Amino acid sequence: MRSLPLSLTAGLITLSLTSALAAEEHWPAPVQALVDQGLEIHGEFAAPGGLSGYAASHRGREMAVYLTPDGDHAVVGTLLDAEGNDLSAAPLDEHVRRVQEAEVWKQLEESHWIQDGDPQAGRVIYTFTDPNCPYCARFHDQSRPWVEAGEVQLRHIMVGILKSDSPAKAAALLGAEDPAAALQAHQESDSGIAASAQSREIEEQVYANNQLFEGLGLMATPTTYYRNEAGRLDKVEGAPDEARLEAMMGSPRP
């Protein structure tokens, strides 16, 4: 095979053709060997030099896989051209990052949240809120100009992670007759809502939110997700500064 004007970097892994059985799998045998080791293949893409490209991920880490022209070996790494341009970034963005962002947004939509603001607002923001989190209360206060102007709808995904009574308080807010009013009163009060027993359904909603929080690898409340000017998913941990706040809200302070 002719030498290619490309280099492969970042932890190259070469896998040989292992068995006739592997060749019968959906993917070419070396790629299937990686799948058997835990990689998830998200899509195929054209690559230069006779290579076949596969966009993959493993435990949330994205990576490109390249199958050699003979079909007998796979290389995991970053493909560069003679000028040092990263040829793996765009396929990974298309096949992995964008897909993962859409999946996360769907999970947020399907979680258990309290609507804060006009349901017809042009901008929707999801934020993980613990009833005992002072920074959540600060972010709630920071967001008021946009929410009260009808420009932004916050969706508070109620979690209980900071203190022993956080789950019960989160359940009390979700189970309130008017959750939005209860949350507003809670954030504006020195004492806040009291923990109280709720139905099993409401308690399971808090548990599901906690599982989502952990599944996304989050560490702090509030953690807020929004779509930036490019339409891509972005997140902010903690109460933002003024510049980041305006970016999240999508406009200057009303």
Image: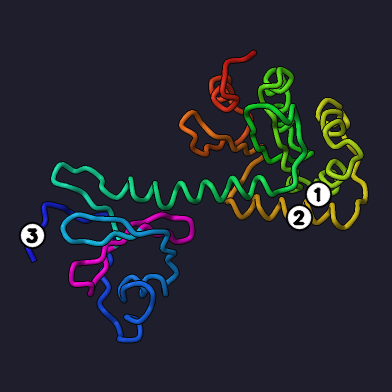
Which corner quadrant of the image does residue 69 belong to? bottom left
Q: CA distance from mark 2 to mark 1?
A: 8 Å
Magenta-drawn segment: 55-75
Q: What is the crowding at mark 2: few (fewer than 14 residues within 10 Å), some, or many (at least 20)?
A: many
Amino acid, disc 3: Ser
Percent across and percent down for residue 202 are 84, 52
Circle 1 crowding by C-alpha within 10 Å: few under 14, some 14–19, many from 20? many
Residue 104 x %, y %: 57, 48
Most extreme residue toward the bottom is 20
Image quadrant for the N terminus? bottom left
Using the image as rendered, state which of residue 138 and residue 209 is in the foreground: 209
Tell me which amino acid carries mark 1. Answer: Pro
Q: Residue at x 72, y 27 (%)?
A: 140
Badge 3 density bin: few <14, some 14–19, many ≥20, Cα 10 Å: few
According to the picture, the residue beneath numbered tag 2 turns out to be 207
Kindly report which numbered mark, 3 or 2, lies closer to the viewer in this rendering: 3
Camera-side mark, 3 or 1: 3
Q: Decide whether residue 144 is among the magenta residues.
A: no
Task: Report the magenta stretch's main SS.
Answer: strand
**Residue that appears at 23% across and 72% down:** 71
Q: Is residue 73 magenta?
A: yes
| Image vertical order of residue 205 relative to residue 141, above or below | below
According to the picture, the residue beneath numbered tag 1 turns out to be 167
Q: Which type of secondary structure does the marked residue at label 2 adopt? A: helix
189 relative position to 135: left or right: right
